[in-house]
Amino acid sequence: MVRSTAILFVVVALVTPSSPLPAAEPAPAADLSTREGEDWGTFLGPSGTGSSSQVGIASPWEAGGPRVVWQAAIGEGYCAPAVAGGRAFLFDRVANRLRLRAVEAETGRPLWEAGREVVYTDSFGYDGGPRAQPVITGHRVLTFGPDGRLECRAIIDGSLLWEVDTSATYHVVQNFFGVGTAPLVVGPLRVGAEERTLVVVQVGGSREGANPAAPERLDLVKGLDSGLVAFDVGSGAEVWRATNQLASYSVPVLATIGGRPLILAWMRDELVAVEPATGKLLDRFRWRSDELFSVVAASPIVSGDQVLLSECYGPGSVLLALENDAFREVRRDKPGARPRQALKTHWNTPVLRDGYVYGSSGRNAGDAQLVCVNWNTGVVGWSEGGLGRSSVTLVDDHLLILGEYGDLVLARATPEKYEEVSRVRPLDAASGRELLAPPCWAAPVIARGLVFVRGTGRVVCLDLMPTR
């Protein structure tokens, strides 16, 4: 067993913010949408599950695939856009400048641009752009740069409302690929005597001067008390901090288990369960490869009182039950299982439908398989290769799959067999060139019948709905 049987050395700090003062409420931004449907302003969508409520999509696609509505050049980075209120927010890096752009979601028309200088350099030679998708809450948009700067801007014009340099404030030793986990917005909820909305981020702070002589030796870095930190969304003031874990690349999720809301955050070594209002740590469960150069990146998947974790470097997947504020292991993958024999996700969070999990299994593009796995047993029902480390979004009883090399695929979400409906590589109408260049590492975003996909150097908006 790898779970801890007691909660040891847990530090939870409640901070009464006296500074900074709450920022002025940003001016409201009118909804620019002309289409019906839900927005996708947070990582994994409004439900936090990678599932869209959109119905009535075109299936199969016409020749050439969904209509390309607009496209835009984009700089370094790997994150998908966030889309809400008829606006799409594109986060990238150009030269030594991080850039956030707001464009009209239905046309691509530029609305505003904001940015700042950045000096982040990737330790492993990947590009230096942002990894974390922007998050929209009310009339604010939040970004978390690869250098650890958390920024809150007004949706209406991009003006900076507040910022926190988490790397400097909490003495963060740079992770292998910098910061790559999106913020989680929680609330409004009761915090002490006040009602607040919080933004929770994986920080992974340590003691001052904790940097090892060899920057990659994160195993020598000991966390302090700021693995997970919650800030007031109105002011940027710290509200609570919890756990001595270092940060991972897995985005925390908010789930209701046992009738109450909980935050589940899969940190560098452990999954932790904390109370949203206080940061009180309830339990933790270790699940990570013993290999130094390994990371966890997929978000936890929740069904009822059960939580599924999956990684690709070592142990693979484990199913847990959270009962009486404690994790209990239900099942785990067999040791040494290959990607086609288990669910071994890299960075892309699978989707769950009717007791079956659909996602990409495999550490490398060459061995990665799209698999369907039984939630209860872990048994693989089918596997399909050729898409690299693909990303999956669930929509209208279909899997919308973005392959690593630029394939956009529509398949039925069925456990019986892999049933592909349509496949296309979107083309530029004028030049005939392919629009999505590898690597395509961000999951498709679906908002009001439009899908937003990103490849190297370009973001593309397509219409999933039938031709009118």
Image (cartoon, grey):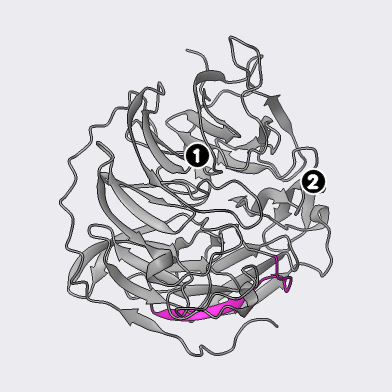
Number of other residues with Cα within 10 Å of mark 2, as a class: few under 14, some 14 to 19, many 20 or more: many
Q: In the picture, residue 267 is in which quadrant?
A: bottom right
Residue at 30% x, 69% y is 238
The residue labelled by disc 2 is: 383
Q: Position of residue 244 (x, y in %)?
A: 49, 79
**Residue numbers of the magenta segment:** 279-293
Tell me whether circle 2 and circle 1 mark residues in contact (CB < 8 Å): no
Q: Secondary structure at mark 1?
A: loop
The residue labelled by disc 1 is: 95
Residue at 62% x, 43% y is 441
Disc 2 residue type? Ser
Q: Quadrant of the N terminus?
A: bottom right
Q: How many badges with numbers are in the image?
A: 2
Which residue is nearer to you in this view: 282 or 76?
76
Q: In the picture, residue 408 is in which quadrant?
A: top right
Left or right position of 256 against 67: left
Q: Position of residue 27 (x, y in %)?
A: 17, 41
Residue at 16% x, 49% y is 25
